[in-house]
Amino acid sequence: MQRRSFLKAGSVAGLAATALVSSSCNLFSGEKKEQDTANADVADQFELNEVTIDTLQQKMQSKEYTSRSITELYLKRIDAIDKAGPKLNSIIQLNPDALSIADAMDKERASGKIRGPLHGIPVLIKDNINTGDKMMTTAGASALIGNVVKDDAFIVKKLREAGAVLLGKTNLSEWANFRSTHSTSAWSSRGGQTKCPYILDRNPSGSSAGSGSAAAANLCAIAIGTETDGSIVSPSSINGLVGIKPTVGLWSRSGIIPISKTQDTAGPMARTVKDAAILLGALAGEDTQDIYTASNRGKIKADYTKFLDANGLQGKRIGVEKDGLKVSPGMDKLFQDAIAVLKSKGATIVEVELYKQIKDAGKAEFTVLLYEFKDGVNQYLSKANSKMKTLADVIAFNKQNEAAAMPFFKQETLELADKKGGLDSKEYLDAVKTTTTVTRNAIDKLLRYNKLDAIAAPTNGFACCIDLVNGDYDNGFGFAGPAAMAGYPHITVPMGASNDLPVGLSFISTAYDEAGIITLGYAYEQASKKRVAPKFRKDLFA
């Protein structure tokens, strides 16, 4: 999750001025400066650069490519960009079975069987999602090294059924950024520090940092992240991607290392709205192991690409969060330009004040997460193939292996969570009622009273500097909290960049209105075309 979004006096309280993005923060000065030109050349020359799922399918249909040749190209790309060159460090483990999966999909295609749009498409997933194969599932924690599980998470089963090639797992902020109050996003004791491909000394944002960095750098066709509060939409925004945080319950969470049963969800991270929509529909479904998915019965759209309408802004009413209008000069210009595009395509803009109504929810959120993290992690570990069977075991392991497990920041958040009681505690019940009820009522009331189709705002501030000494700092406005606490859908679409640092435009709506926000996001994307591939600059002065 995006730790800053709730630690700065609650998810939505105390919005500070955005840090100046003109400053440089290169912490990798020991690396060769001459690498930058070579890195840019590799990015420009990669033959699958910015390729879409549709294009890959067309090329496999024409036999220009096979799933195996596509997979091999991505593996070579990972060697050149992730493990060498700029060393993005976004991949925590490659799947040794990737090429055999690709071969099987090619064999099926040759026999006339096509499972769907994901058939033969290489996908990267975050390393807190179980895979019943040779790969580990660790949440980036050295305490969980060796956790090779027997069964796929529900969404991984769906991914395999769709014919996707599971390319590997991505690095993340350890324990999905729920370990310390002074942590650095995109760092884990197992995987190290992931970099932002746009400016290498910038943080790609947590906790789905590896998925964001990898998809932006064209290391895969599409990626999967997970979110509790901001961890899909924030790294998507920072890395110039489209990210969809679905309604909690649209995608199953079973087989995913948890933080919060009321807020957690996985979701797609892609370079286009269409690619994200393809993945969204393919992995949605009811799972008996996750009772939250019972609410999606009759509400899932089998094909979300049906809602991709370039004229989808015509006649729509969009609320604009007032607190997002005055953030910083660079952000304000991008947002005003985005609003102008929305208006030019027929949307009516209405200023709203959502944040004013949900301050109490923001203050209660951290309490909810502490309780639910302890409960969820203890349940997960009790069934895991790991020596760690409780959260207390993890805390003890980290203390015993402090030099390797906690070299930069400690585990105050884990310790706070372990001190909490059960989910029958009055403190917990009061807090969860506040977060869900207040935010849902506030969003739904604004939508209904103003006859809005969605509420929009900048997704977050520009990428902050990687700082393993002091930890993350506040980079200003963030719009993840409301939809996260409500469990409502959220899409971010590239809105432009300042000093080569991208940022996204967010649309949120009510429960299971993925179709509505996908329409808005796609229409804006097609009208603005703000996605730009990264250049792998060493710092802002390069």
Image (tube, rainbow, N blue to C red):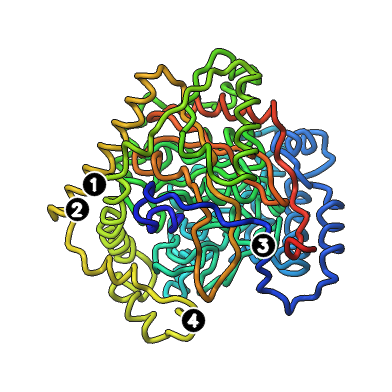
Residue 290 place in picture, x, y as percent = 32, 44
Q: Secondary structure at mark 2?
A: helix
| Residue receiving disc 2 | 428
Q: Is residue 444 above or below residue 480?
A: above
Circle 1: is it few (<14), some (14-19), or many (20+) Cα within 10 Å? many
| Residue receiving disc 3 | 23
Q: Secondary structure at mark 3?
A: loop
Q: Which badge, 3 or 1, is on the more N-terminal residue?
A: 3
Q: Which residue shows up at 45% across the image and 79% down it?
A: 406
| Residue receiving disc 1 | 432
State the CA–CA distance, disc 1 to disc 4.
34 Å
| Residue 69: assigned label | none
Q: Is residue 94 visible?
A: no
Looking at the image, do the residues carrying marks 2 and 4 touch, with CB atoms under 8 Å apart?
Answer: no
- Please identify the quarter of the rendering in which residue 24 is found: bottom right
Q: Which badge, 1 or 4, is on the more N-terminal residue?
A: 4
Looking at the image, do the residues carrying marks 1 and 4 touch, with CB atoms under 8 Å apart?
Answer: no
| Residue 407: assigned label | 4
Residue 182 place in picture, x, y as percent = 43, 69
State the CA–CA distance, disc 3 to disc 4.
26 Å
Looking at the image, do the residues carrying marks 3 and 1 touch, with CB atoms under 8 Å apart?
Answer: no
Q: Secondary structure at mark 1?
A: helix
Name the residue type under label 2: Tyr
In the image shown, does 173 or 497 lie closer to the viewer?
Answer: 497
State the CA–CA distance, disc 2 to disc 4.
32 Å
Q: Which badge, 2 or 4, is on the more N-terminal residue?
A: 4
Looking at the image, do the residues carrying marks 1 and 2 touch, with CB atoms under 8 Å apart?
Answer: yes
Q: Please tell me whether mark 2 or mark 3 is closer to you in this view.
A: 3
Residue 135 place in picture, x, y as percent = 54, 64
Circle 2: is it few (<14), some (14-19), or many (20+) Cα within 10 Å? many
